[in-house]
Amino acid sequence: MYLLAIDWFFILEKLALIFVIIMLSMGVAMYATYGERKVAAFIQDRIGPNRAGPFGLFQPLADGGKLFFKEEIIPLASSKFLFILGPLLAMVTALLTSAVIPWGSSMTIGNRQVPLQVADVNIGILYVFGVVSLGVYGIMLGGWASNNKFSLLAAIRGASQMVSYELAMGLSLIAVLMLTGSLQMSVIVGEQYNSVWNIVYQPLGFIIFFICALAETNRTPFDLPEAENELNFGYHQEYSSMKLGFYLFAEYINMFISGVIMATLYFGGYDIPFVNEAHLAQRIGENWVALLTFLMLMAKALFFVFVFMWIRWTIPRFRFDQLMHLGWKRLIPLALANMILTAVVILWLKK
Amino acid sequence: MSVQLTNRSRPVDRRPMNWAERLYLINIFKGMAITLKHFFKKKATIKYPEETRPFSKVFRGLQILNRDEEGRERCTACGLCAVACPAEAITMEAAERQEGEENLYREEKYAAKYEINMLRCIFCGYCEEACPKDAIYLSQTFTPANYQRKGFIYKKEDLLIPNPVTDPEGYQKALGTISREKEGV
């Protein structure tokens, strides 16, 4: 009997949402490659890709098509199963994170309240952390399975880098969790929705989180795992065709998702600044407000993606010892201090 | 002792970084301000096939074989250009003008075959200097493209300027750069 009590609309709604979000992440990642090239060009006083379609807008399609039609090479001496699993894991973990993010205020379809969030689990942040840490497997497996010294070195670098920076990231987040008192993403956003954004209370925490996010997504100045001039592209050196494409794609999806998470945790999520959404909803309807809030979140996230690119084309790469030095001797103490300070202030005010 | 050429040189600061500098943040923001400034700067790109860069009057591009005002070929196949050519890119075969060909060739001798290997040519312009008949000129055309090497061996038909009698527009277009060059010199 229970089997028949399944809420089919619920499943349908979630499936639709998952489909939309995955397509969105893919689309954003695709155009992030275009954006990256344009930003790079503009910063270097060039104009960037402008041949495929108006303003070169079809360039990502051409690049993707090219990658699909390239020859697939699996090195003979590689561990084949893991070699294929590597990019797959990188892609899956990159996409999985989007499940707990609230993408906008809830919509009303028919007489159902549809939240724009796939899974509002009460351990949202923890889940994000778990999945992000799994991301290191994509790099590790890929690098190890290639049976190539450069790839292995890069994989080890990537693993150590991600492990060290996850620590500081987690510590900087604890301060946010203490402010909101919940791990649930929707609660964290709701809190900022009704009062001020977390960035006001946690500027230092945000900077630490941002730096760690750069390191987690393997972006310059922390792109040591794929340092072209030292390691010949690092862990994806032996990869070709779409498997390489997946690695590159995963990086851009990671970038987008970490932008969304930063917006969610520190910049009010889908909150439209200086606008009372409840009043707006009475004026133009709830669904339109949901769309607007979603666009707001996208704007914030894309701004962070832009900053990521901006940093990439400004700062040279860290040396490995500098990277570890910054991570362990600067960011972790700073994050700890930030955490303790926040705790003290919260206790003080509660007293 | 070194001579000071400009007053922009500064001694290198080798002091150890202080605490704020070791955080890198301030200098990173400075750098980002610089890159952002470049973001809005005028771009240096010239969208090549649509826009071209203006060349100087003495630019040396692909050769053309000139004609006189009546559309007759000026070249008499004297071979001075071939002799002058340091890259040995030019070959030619002479022939005698027959009765009734006076409207084609300016003098009694003409080049039956005239070839320039554009892969060998170094565009030095010595052929142009050597020519006593004003027959060969370096135009402003450049970047020839071809699928095969043999396509780069330009025959007389590829080199000849358009006929001013039958195709005055094309002739003026091809001539434009040459006449300007003459005025300049």
Image: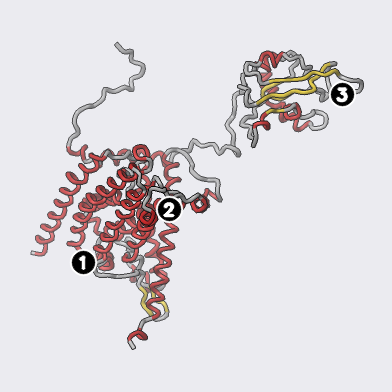
Tally of numbered tags: 3
Q: Quadrant of the N terminus of chain A?
A: bottom left
Q: Amino acid at mark 2?
A: Lys
- Mark 1, secondary structure of its residue: loop
The Cα–Cα distance between marks 2 and 3, rounded to whole angstroms, is 68 Å
User: Where is A283 relative to A40, above or below?
Assistant: below
Residue indicated by mark 1 = A182
- Mark 3, secondary structure of its residue: loop
Q: Amino acid at mark 3?
A: Asn
| Chain holding disc 3 | B
Mark identifier at residue B103: 3
- Mark 2, secondary structure of its residue: helix
Residue A278 in the image: x percent, y percent?
A: 33, 71
Residue A124 in the image: x percent, y percent?
A: 26, 65
Q: Amino acid at mark 1?
A: Ser
Mark identifier at residue A268: none
Q: Quadrant of the C terminus of chain A?
A: bottom left
Residue B27 in the image: x percent, y percent?
A: 27, 38
Residue A311 in view here: no
Residue indicated by mark 2 = A243
The Cα–Cα distance between marks 2 and 1, rounded to whole angstroms, is 38 Å
In-image side of B157 versus A154 (left or right) = right
The Cα–Cα distance between marks 3 and 1, rounded to whole angstroms, is 97 Å
Q: Quadrant of residue A222 in the image?
A: top left
> Do tag 2 and tag 1 residues touch (Cβ < 8 Å)?
no
Give the residue drawn at x 38%, y 76%: A11
Crowding at dot 3, Cα within 10 Å, few <14 / some 14-19 / many 20+, comes out as few
Q: Quadrant of residue A18 in the image?
A: bottom left
Tell which residue pokes out farthest to the left in this image: A351
